[in-house]
Image (spheres, rainbow, N blue to C red):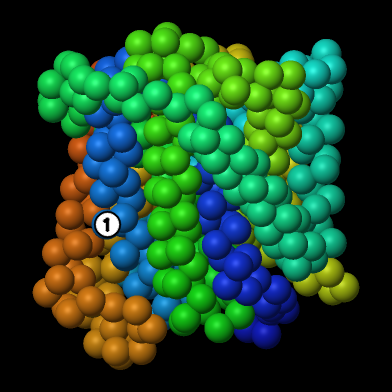
């Protein structure tokens, strides 16, 4: 079902990601900006009931992750968000997803770098855009010289984040948490608890990140599904622990009104240690998300170039470092272009999340089709549910993604309009480039 075939005997990417690299990529993508910003609006809406909202918000991602774990254990490829839809849904659908994610990932890089600069500026005042450019350079270098270097950096940063949040949880729980602040548990009713869930779904976005580098994962049939499961489990426990401490220290109303809830809670029991510890946690957390984004975005461009729908130069693999260096340089260039975007976080968050939700829904459809139409791949999977359950879970995951896309329109219509316009540009590019490939093929 593809419009173009990759050339034979292309150089392969190096397998440099182990199980803990898979976990670090998943947690590294998920535990980022959202943990520092999503708790306040959720607490304002649901009160202490936001603890249940965390679990409800995790449910759609859990359903979607089952499809990712299934596909990742039977057909590990780099650039999975393009390759799987191209093979099992339709090449045009795969192109649209990755084309929209060009904008989404550019916006994500800007958001990550901007928030990171703001936290660093709490200690030392820094110029915004020059510092963001320096962060992009650091992320490029970490990924350019080998996937093992990027994966090792991801593991170190992830370990640091977990340790720092554990310090926050145990220090706060042992000295300042007042469980009376958790009552009444649902001051605004259970509907408010459900309404807060979409805000917190973003806490788990990216948990499937390692599937984008599937061909670079060692023992992928085991490590991808196990790594995704571990990532979801650790992320859920981490978020619940941080939320309980923040609620127990501040109370729901002050937490809901805070612009920096984790920092404000930490100041209550850490004193002068609060600012440096939370800034270091934010730096490590957001830094690893930026590092992971460079790694995974470049693999999507690499996969599209190999399929012939983006310029072939993006599929070049460095002979020494065995990394997709042209794709990485393109990601860096897009990040630099993003420095000229307006620094409006609400708009940027929606521009990032909408294409990702489209991607999630399409991957679920691909998982259902593999289960139904490709018995050899289904049987080969290292992780799978019984066929009827696998298809049902994939359908629920796709529906969940669609509901979240529709709900987002209420917040701001502008990102939808921008993405529609960008999608039309992509359609023109696709038609023109495909015509050029067909004409070139007819002359050979």
In which quadrant is the C terminus drawn?
bottom right
In which quadrant is the N terminus drawn?
bottom left
Q: Is residue 303 left or right of residue 56?
A: right
Where on the picture, by quarter, is residue 295? bottom right
Where on the picture, by quarter, is residue 439? bottom right
Task: Locate residue 371, reporting x and y percent.
Answer: 23, 77
Residue at the spot of label 1: 63
Tell me the residue at 48%/12% (across/down).
258
Tell me the residue at 19%/62% (across/down).
393
Is 20 above or below relative to 234? Answer: below
Q: Is residue 250 visible?
A: yes
Where on the picture, by quarter, is residue 165? top right
Element under disc 1: helix
Task: Locate residue 226, reporting x and y percent.
Answer: 45, 72
Task: Locate residue 47, reporting x and y percent.
Answer: 28, 20
Q: Is residue 91 visible?
A: no
Residue that lies at the very extreme toward the right in this rendered image: 320
Task: Locate residue 301, reporting x and y percent.
Answer: 60, 55
Tell me the residue at 31%/55% (across/down).
62
Q: Nearer the viewer, residue 29 or 265?
A: 265
Q: Is residue 7 left or right of residue 172?
A: right
């Amino acid at each position: 079902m593809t419009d173009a075939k990759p050339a034979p005997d292309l150089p392969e990417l190096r397998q440099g990601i182990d199980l803990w690299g898979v976990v670090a990529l998943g947690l590294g993508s998920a535990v980022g900006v959202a943990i520092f910003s999503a708790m306040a609006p959720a607490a304002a809406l649901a009160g202490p009931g936001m603890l249940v909202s965390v679990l409800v918000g995790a449910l759609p991602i859990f359903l979607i992750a089952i499809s990712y774990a299934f596909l990742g254990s039977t057909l590990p490829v780099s650039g999975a968000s393009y390759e799987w839809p191209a093979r099992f849904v339709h090449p045009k659908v795969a192109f649209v997803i990755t084309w929209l994610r060009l904008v989404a990932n550019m916006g994500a890089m800007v958001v990550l770098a901007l928030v990171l600069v703001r936290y660093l500026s709490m200690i030392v005042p820094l110029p915004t855009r020059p510092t963001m450019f320096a962060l992009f350079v650091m992320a490029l270098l970490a990924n350019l010289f080998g996937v093992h270097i990027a994966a090792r950096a991801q593991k170190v940063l992830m370990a640091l984040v977990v340790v720092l949040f554990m310090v926050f949880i145990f220090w706060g729980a042992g000295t300042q948490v007042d469980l009376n602040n958790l009552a009444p548990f649902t001051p605004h009713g259970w509907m408010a608890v459900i309404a807060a869930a979409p805000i917190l779904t973003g806490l788990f976005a990216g948990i499937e990140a390692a599937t984008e580098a599937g061909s670079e994962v060692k023992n992928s049939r085991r490590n991808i599904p196990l790594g995704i499961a571990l990532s979801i489990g650790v992320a859920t426990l981490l978020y619940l622990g941080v939320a309980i401490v923040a609620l127990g220290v501040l109370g729901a109303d002050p937490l809901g009104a805070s612009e920096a809830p984790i920092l404000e809670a930490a100041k209550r029991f850490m004193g002068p240690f609060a600012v440096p510890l939370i800034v270091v946690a934010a730096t490590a957390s957001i830094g690893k998300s930026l590092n992971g984004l460079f790694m995974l975005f470049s693999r999507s461009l690499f996969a599209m170039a190999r399929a012939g729908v983006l310029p072939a130069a993006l599929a070049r693999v460095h002979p020494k470092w065995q990394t997709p260096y042209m794709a990485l340089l393109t990601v860096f260039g897009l990040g630099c272009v993003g420095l000229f975007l307006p620094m409006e976080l609400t708009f940027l968050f929606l521009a990032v999340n909408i294409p990702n939700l489209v991607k999630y829904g399409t991957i679920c459809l691909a998982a259902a089709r593999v289960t139904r139409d490709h018995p050899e791949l289904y049987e080969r999977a290292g992780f799978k549910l019984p066929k009827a359950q696998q298809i049902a879970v994939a359908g629920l995951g796709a529906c969940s993604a669609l509901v979240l896309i529709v709900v987002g329109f209420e917040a701001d219509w502008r990102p939808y309009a921008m993405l529609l316009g960008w999608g039309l540009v992509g359609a023109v590019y696709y038609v023109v480039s495909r015509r050029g490939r067909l004409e070139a093929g007819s002359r050979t």
